[in-house]
Image (tube, rainbow, N blue to C red):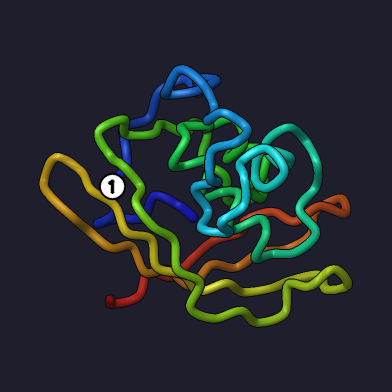
Amino acid sequence: MSAPEGAPRGSARAPAERVDNAAPPAADVCPCGSRLAYEPCCGAFHAGRPAPTAETLMRSRYSAFALGLPGYLAETWAEATRPDEIDLDDGTVWRRLQIVDILDGGPDDESGIVEFRAAYRDPDGAGLLHERARFIRADGRWVYLDGQIRGS
């Protein structure tokens, strides 16, 4: 998930550890929509465990946006397309992730596509980011390459 034109994003500045103060307690439901607790779900990936599939990485990146983890977003962004700095707009609240389509991106694949819709609210009101995101393996780990914004 990127911060494409027309979608909420902040301005460039030095990456910070977190925008908010703390990850959700382990018993809280993960923001990715899995209905699992945060710690065994995306919390494990945010702590360093490699995502086994492109979809799992997509979900963990969505959670990183929702929780304000720019360091994780940078680590999971392909070097060739990664911005120099990632700034998250603390006025944006990510509400819901819906996976629309998945093409490849399994444990034995080298590339994959995950199409998703991410609902958010910012100071201007409610919005929906609809993106077809491309993922590749780099050094054996899934990373976000780029995405194409779709009409909602």
Q: Position of residue 89 (x, y in %)?
A: 31, 34
> On the rendered structure, is 102 left or right of 126?
right
Q: Position of residue 130 (x, y in %)?
A: 37, 69
Q: Quadrant of the C terminus?
A: bottom left
Q: Position of residue 78 (x, y in %)?
A: 66, 50
Q: Measuring 23% from the left and 48% from the top, which residue is drawn there?
A: 121
How crowded pointer 1 is (Cα within 10 Å; few <14, some 14-19, many 20+) is rated as many
Residue 91 picture quarter? top left
> Total of numbered circles in the picture?
1
> On the rendered structure, is 20 left or right of 123?
right
Residue 73 picture quarter? top right
Q: Position of residue 113 (x, y in %)?
A: 61, 74
Element type where label 1 sits in the image: loop
> On the rendered structure, is 6 left or right of 58?
left
Q: Measuring 88% from the left and 72% from the top, which residue is drawn there?
A: 108
Q: Which residue is mark 1?
A: 8
Q: Amino acid at mark 1?
A: Pro
Q: Tell me if residue 82 comes above or below residue 142 in the rendering.
A: above
Instruction: Name the residue nearer the viewer: 2 or 51.
Output: 51
Q: Measuring 11% from the left and 46% from the top, which residue is drawn there?
A: 124
Q: Tell me if residue 64 comes above or below residue 4 in the rendering.
A: above
